[in-house]
Amino acid sequence: MHKIGRIGIVGGGSWATANAKIIQEKKQAINWYIHEQEVIDHLKEHGNNPLYLSSVEFDPNLLNLSTDINEVVKNSDTIIFIIPAAYLKFALEKLTIPLKGKTIISAIKGIVPDDNLLVGDFLNKKYDVPFDSLGIITGPCHAEEVALERLSYLTIAFRESEKAEALANLYNNHYIKTTLSDDIIGTEYAAVLKNIYALAAGICHGIGYGDNFQSVLISNAIREMKRFTDTVFPIERDIKDSAYLGDLLVTAYSQFSRNRHFGNMIGKGYSVKYIKNEMDMIAEGYFASKCIFEINKKFNVSMPIADAIFNILYEKKSPRKIINELTNKLT
């Protein structure tokens, strides 16, 4: 059996905090990189993250907190990256300790902008991390429900089943159940795409479309996701599995979905600049929309929903007009 060893977390947001909570259920010590010294000071003194999921209580004795990413990477055998994809390169700028030789896990549901690479591909190409050492954690799961200890399911994807099983053993508890997968590319792309489709659901709600239309939209979205993942990484997969359809549904419909919220405000007429300033968390779908559009120039998959969201966000076209045109392309 693969041994997890010393755990490191890179990131201090809500999903990072939720993962730290899950891991500490097993009384596992955590090396935790957080950018803000004031958050670390608060965690040491009060045992909670003042910015995200502040109701979650930690045992400070099990937290080795640091603003030095090299210290965390050096002292960890398994490192979980849980920061917005748009900030990944910034976070790694000061990294001098090699990632190669460690087990690297991405719980990031986005694409690295400019490079247009999945996080796993980015770490493989830029930091020489072998794909056999890379794992993916995906939903369907919202951090807020982890904080409330509502029953949630995670999908853990590795090429090597022993590594997946070891991580699953760490994560399984009375409110977390895990499913294993070997589809590290497909699950990661699905985690990216569902954010774009959640933006679409939010935009349509903001404009005034109802539940009847939303059901058709999401039915088309899962078929669009299947076309793309089957083209980019053609292996045997069931698109109805939780990692694909389940994650799409919760992100498109949940009250906790920041991507749906972002889209809803777009539909109501707010500008992207205003929404970014108003929200205290990143909506990964905004950045992913442009990345997927650029990537799909190579594959030329039919993606009317993703194309519509790109046109609204980056071509500054009227949401009402674009969605009206989209309705004629759905079945």
Image (spheres, rainbow, N blue to C red):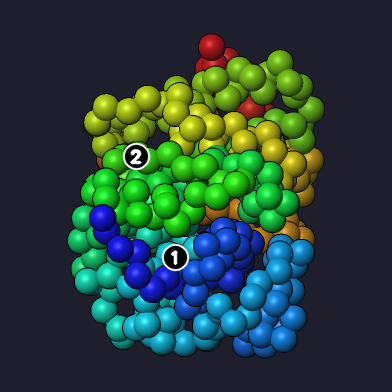
Task: Decide: is 46 above or below 122.
Answer: below
Q: Which amino acid does label 2 sit on?
A: Ser
Q: Measured from the top left, where is residue 265 in percent x and y?
A: 75, 45
* Image quarter (top left, top right, bottom left or bottom right) of the C terminus: top right
Looking at the image, do the residues carrying marks 1 and 2 touch, with CB atoms under 8 Å apart? Answer: no
- The residue lying furthest to the top in this view is 331
Closer-to-camera residue (326/189):
189
Residue at image point 33% right, 49% down: 164
Please name which of the two marks, 1 or 2, marks the residue nearer to the observer.
Answer: 2
Q: Identify the mark nearer the N-term, 1 or 2.
A: 1
Secondary structure at numbered mark 1: strand
* Total marks placed: 2
Secondary structure at numbered mark 2: strand
Q: Measured from the top left, where is residue 107 in percent x and y?
A: 46, 56
Determine which of the numbered discs, if any, sits on residue 92 in the image.
none
* Residue 6 visible in rendering: yes
Task: Decide: is 296 above or below 74.
Answer: above
Using the rendered view, name the quadrant where residue 53 is placed: bottom right
Quick check: 92 left or right of 321? left
Residue at image point 57% right, 61% down: 25
Q: Name the residue that disc number 2 marks.
A: 181
Q: Measured from the top left, where is residue 244 in percent x and y?
A: 46, 33
Residue at image point 68% right, 34% down: 253
Q: Which amino acid does label 1 sit on?
A: Phe
Using the rendered view, name the quadrant where residue 217 is placed: top right
Q: Name the residue that disc number 1 marks.
A: 81
* Image quarter (top left, top right, bottom left or bottom right) of the N terminus: bottom left
